[in-house]
Amino acid sequence: MAHPFSFGTLCAQPSADPRTTRPHQLPIYATSSFAFEGLPEGMQVFSGDQPGYLYSRFGNPTIDAVAAKIAALESLNLAGKATAYLLSSGMAAISTLCLALLKPGEKILIPNNLYGGTNELFAKILTPMGYQAVIGNLREEAALRRQLQADPSIKMVYFETPANPTLSCIDLQMAADAARQAGAYAVVDNTFATPYLQQPFLYGAHFVVHSTTKYLNGHGNSTSGAIVGLDEALMKEKVFPALKLIGTNCSPWDAWLLENGMKTLELRMERHCSNAMQIARWLEGQPEVAKVHYPGLESHEDHQLAKKQMCAFGGVVSFELKGGAAAGQRFVSGLQLCSLAPTMGDVDTLVMHPASMSHLRVPPEQRRAAGITDGMIRLSIGIESPQDLIADLKNGLGRVAKGRRI
Ligand SMILES: *Cc1c(COP(=O)(O)O)cnc(C)c1O
């Protein structure tokens, strides 16, 4: 069943208020519970015989309307419909999904370059609880199939594409097929790409998770996450009870901020992508830069794969400075417009020097194994005028060059 509207229209239209059609924009239902006309209605709703709201941890019109929009965006070009839930953060989405789907003793297969928080969740929380995460090679079909075949206790294959910090990609179709055939769930963190650039369900993923804190909100003013699934029964019978009983639900305020942000998702993503492409090409020509990582560049090792499964290449660009950690520190100290902040996906440009910020306490050899060199800089390119961004990056590179001469 095709949706009657296209991506940008779906983003821009107010999410339907399930209770009334009068407010033009979706209201914030700042209420923890919902009143009943009388006992008969209360009994009907509690028993599930009649749809209705009870208590905001179980469901809330603001939250449900925004979740429905994300489900529609992720399944836009699909025959079937997706179901989505909003959660309090991306981490809440990932942890809730794992606890909902897996039993202790079952394993999660992951690549070695997941988002830092996800890695820590698997290593410090889930593995001690009996849900062991094992690192595998998700870039090579034969290796992946061999590992899945050798260990039938692997019940989930979990990955990001593109992934931090080198923007390396995983073949969605290949990894989802291998997981499916081994009887494991294929779960994709689609935070970097958003459903505008990439729809993992088209390639056979079972579940998509998001840190909606990033591009979907886009304005850096709320924290939330989403779980999206194609199997409605599994979502209702396994994922929803976990969310409700662990209490990882989103708040109506954060859902409302997300709603506002998503209205411009298409416009923002187009600008993020065109700015990032221009900056990546410019960086490639700078003498202080040893290497640029951006899947839109022909020089990126996964350019062909990214072209196959994404419609553009996203807003994150990382690059390596020739002078190592000292050059990285000099570069960020020379910037005036770009902010040093450990997030991404905002409308303004954000910079990170992983070796002195997010990965400061990670031993250097472990950092290097994940592709993070000491001179690496990660840019989350905003929607500013590209000439201003390039001028500011020149400020940073100027500081690097001056440092080298001293
Ligand atoms: C930020 C992020 C997360 C975690 O999301 P929070 O909203 O911070 O909990 C998970 N995955 C990726 C790829 C992220 O960038």
Image (cartoon, helix red, strand yellow):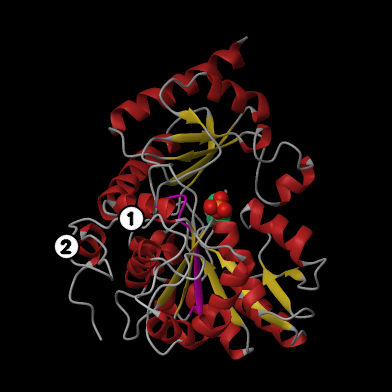
Q: Nearer the viewer, residue 182 or 1?
A: 1
Let me know if residue 221 is in the magenta part: no
Q: Tag 2: residue type?
A: Arg
Residue denoted by label 1: 259
List the residue tagged with mark 2: 22
Contact flag, marks 1 and 2 (Cβ < 8 Å): no
Name which residue lies at 68% across and 77% down: 143
Give the Cα distance between marks 1 and 2: 18 Å
| Earlier-in-chain disc, 1 versus 2 | 2
Nearer the observer, 170 or 244: 244
Q: In the picture provided, is 15 more to the left or to the right than 130?
A: left
Please say whether residue 166 is visible from this viewpoint. Answer: no
Q: Looking at numbered disc 1 in the image, what kind of residue is underneath it? A: Glu
Residue 50 numbered tag: none
Q: Against 374, is 306 above or below?
A: below
Residue at x-position 66% and y-position 30%: 324
Was residue 206 drawn as part of the magenta stretch in this picture?
yes
The residue stretch that appears in magenta? 205-215
| Circle nearer the viewer, 1 or 2 | 2
